[in-house]
Amino acid sequence: MSEITGVRFVLAVLNLDRSTDYYTSVLGLGIDFEAPGWSFLSRGSFRVMLGECIDAIPPGELGDHSYYGYITVADVDALYAEYQQSGVQFTQLLASKPWGMREFGIRTLDGHRLMFGQEL
């Protein structure tokens, strides 16, 4: 069986410049590559492609379908503190969960929701 060696999320955003700025200045991702209508970003093994789709349904209007990823991190407390300083909008505050994860949730500028967690 072939091994999957990486994952990159693909997201529709309404304003590419604004969204790219949010992912880099607020969430701390770096720009890997840019092409007309696209930004390829990463932070460690977390990778995302932002594609400008000005006519797309805003993710905030998708309810639970606006969740797009659960990212595991080495130090969730440190990332949570970093994001508190950055002004991230939290959907769930940092807490230890009975399923063995310490996690928190955020909502991006476009309304996409992400969870970040660390195994306890």
Image: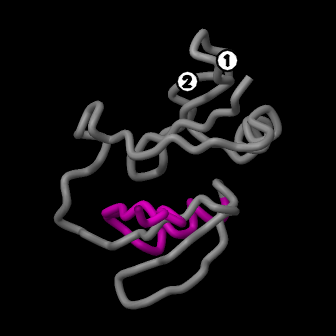
Near-viewer residue (120 or 37): 120
What residue is at 69 percent from the left and 33 percent from the top? 118
Q: Which residue is mark 1?
A: 95
How many C-alpha atoms fall within 10 Å of the one at disc 1: few (<14), some, or many (≥20)? few
Three-letter code, disc 2? Gln
Secondary element at tag 2: strand
Circle 2 residue = 92
Magenta stretch: includes residue 110: no
Indicate the position of residue 115 as horizontal and vertical percent values: 53, 36
Question: Residue lying furthest front in this view?
Answer: 1
In the image, taking residue 34 as reference, residue 43 lies left or right, namely: right
Q: Quadrant of the C terminus?
A: top right
Expressed as whole percent of the image width and height from the top left, the position of residue 29 reads 65, 64
Q: Where is residue 116? Give x, y as percent.
A: 60, 38
Question: From which residue to which does the magenta span run?
Answer: 1-25
Residue at (64, 61) in percent of width and height: 45
